[in-house]
Amino acid sequence: MLTKKIVKVHLKQTFRISHGATDEKEIVLVNIDGGIGEASPVNYYGESVATIGDFIDKAAAVIGDDPFRLEQMCDRLNHLAAYNFSAKAAIDIALHDLVGKRLGIPVHKLLGIAPRDDIATSYTISINDPDSVKKQVRDNPGYKVYKVKVGVPNDIEMVAAVRDSTDAAIRVDANGGWSLKEAMQKIKLLQKYDVEFVEQPLHWKDFEGFKILRQKSILPIFADEGVMRAEDIAQYYGLVDGINIKLMKSGGIREAFKMISVARALQMKIMIGCMVETSVGISAAAQLASLVDYVDLDGNLLIADDPFEGIRAVDGYLKYNDKPGIGVTEKP
């Protein structure tokens, strides 16, 4: 039986990116015979808890009663309606969790993936004034990597403030907030702060801009917003150095696994990332983390009242458990 529940979670502090700011997030939890999944909607992908609920209601009639037919079920979901990727991800995650639980093994083992103990996740520093940015780093010490949200007028000062506060690696993410001219100017300034790479500097449809920027940029460029599924990757071939895969925009574990294979075939670097998600979504994505180059799975770390426990971050590294499925339990 497929059931759904809306849960509101609250951020530890206001989370600001170039798209906007939020203090709370409504997510949709899915349960399929004990398998747990999560949909964390993002409005710029056209999703809300309402659209997710509608899709899940329709999906109940087509997923069937054999969870081991994962490929068939995901294909049915894709034919049910276009887009609705976080809703599809919730069902996909729940099915993988259910299969893992029935077999008594973690999902990474189901997929033939060996977990590693050296996977460092970045911690996201949201847009704010430099003093507040420094406080974010002080309040969240010990991470090996900090990802700084940029795409606003004072963003270089923010990166400088992070560098003043830590010797850890720094990555920046503009969420498409720069023009080509701004990106070229700011990337030159970022090199002195020892930034690893720049994520989504331009609007995702600015392919000509990406072509020019990659030719001139001294830092690697990653694409995020426009890379939702495997078929989206090829259009960025030669324009970026890597891509960011997220379960909430791919439609779940099954499609993300395919995306990793396509990106590797095209010799592109891979990051696995997240939205603001509970430990359900983060623990699901972590099942694939051993296959990628960079990890940004901190969505649950930004939440003050995560209702679940799962994969943890200890001293900045992901720590797996031996629980079956995606490895999460609900807090009492």
Image: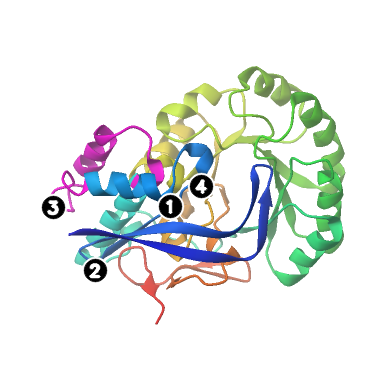
Q: Which residue is mark 3?
A: 66
Quick one: quadrant of the C terminus? bottom left
Q: Which residue is mark 4?
A: 292
Rendered location of residue 158, percent (x, y):
82, 51
Q: Which residue is mark 2?
A: 104
Q: Mark 4 belongs to which amino acid?
A: Val
Kindly state the secondary structure of the residue where label 1 is placed.
loop
Give the Cα distance between marks 2 and 3.
17 Å
Given this view, does label 4 or label 3 mark the residue nearer the observer? 3
Kindly state the secondary structure of the residue where label 4 is placed.
loop
Please state the extent of the stretch shown in magenta in the rendering.
59-87
In the rendered view, would you say 180 is above or below 324? Answer: above
Q: Which residue is mark 1?
A: 288
Q: Mark 2 belongs to which amino acid?
A: Gly
Direction from residue 258 to residue 32 in the image, left or right: left
| Crowd band around label 1 with a 10 angstrom C-alpha radius: few (<14), some (14–19), many (20+) | many
Question: Mark 2 or mark 3, which has the lower sequence index?
Answer: 3
Residue at (23% x, 44% y) in the render = 58
Given this view, does label 3 or label 1 mark the residue nearer the observer? 3
